[in-house]
Image: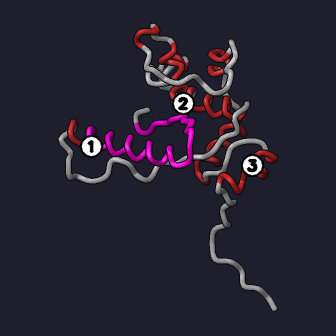
Amino acid sequence: MPNHWHLLLWPERDGQLAQFMMRLTTRHVRRWLTAHDQVGTGHLYQGRFKSFACQSDKHLLTVARYIDRNARRAKLVARCEDWPWSAVGQSALPSELRPGLSEFPVERGEDWLSWVNEPQTKSEEESIRASVRTSRPYGSKEWIQRNRQSLGWTPPKPPGRPRKALN
């Protein structure tokens, strides 16, 4: 995307995600600033990366679809596979030109491309955006409740000052 990017990552151990993102973003910033003769001019990113855990079932497929639809949703392409920097765009390349990516952890199904090109519901999009904003895990209510402690997620507190207790 012209002003942001999405990654769907599957870390194998605790701590890998933060370590990988630090290396990736540090390297990207250094190369971008050097290439654009902007070294010493300030920040490239507006803030720390945002992440959320996702249940490895249809919820993971919904997030992957959201990411693959990003350029089409922004009206940058007519079909999702036309965006060359997306996973579906890369899959359209000859196999010798594709980057060496790991296998997807969930079976996508044969109709993946047609499903990706269909619009998502507003509730799917809003639910994913809420997970991005609050780091809320994305999955079924039961899965979130069951894994809440191990994922280290607590619901955000309402904004503003807490009400005084009345005695």
Placement of the N terminus among the 4 image quadrants: top left
Placement of the C terminus among the 4 image quadrants: bottom right
Task: Name the front one of labels 2 and 1.
Answer: 1
Which residue occupies 41% across, 38% down? 3
Rate crowding at label 2 as few (under 14), some (14 to 19) or many (20 or more) other CA atoms within 10 Å: some
Mark 1 is on which residue type?
Arg
Mark 3 is on which residue type?
Ile
**127 relative to 71 in the view: left or right:** right
Which numbered disc flags the more N-terminal residue, 2 or 1?
1
Q: Which residue lies under the disc numbered 2?
A: 70
Which residue occupies 60% across, 46% down? 52
- Say if 4 sits above or below 39 in the image: above
Residues in magenta, as a range: 3-32
Labelled disc at residue 67: none
Separation of marks 2 and 1 at Cα, in angstroms: 26 Å
Q: Tell me residue 110's x, y (percent).
A: 68, 12
Q: Tell me residue 95's x, y (percent).
A: 46, 9
Q: Circle 1 sits in a helix, a strand or a loop, which is it?
A: helix
Q: Which residue lies under the disc numbered 3?
A: 144
Which residue occupies 21% across, 36% down? 35
Q: Circle 3 sits in a helix, a strand or a loop, which is it?
A: helix
Q: Tell me residue 40's x, y (percent).
A: 20, 52
Labelled disc at residue 30: 1
Mark 2–mark 3 CB contact (< 8 Å): no
Q: In the current view of this chain or complex, which residue is farthest to the bottom? A: 167
Which numbered disc flags the more N-terminal residue, 3 or 1?
1
Which residue occupies 70% across, 39% down? 55
Is residue 150 one of those drawn in magenta? no
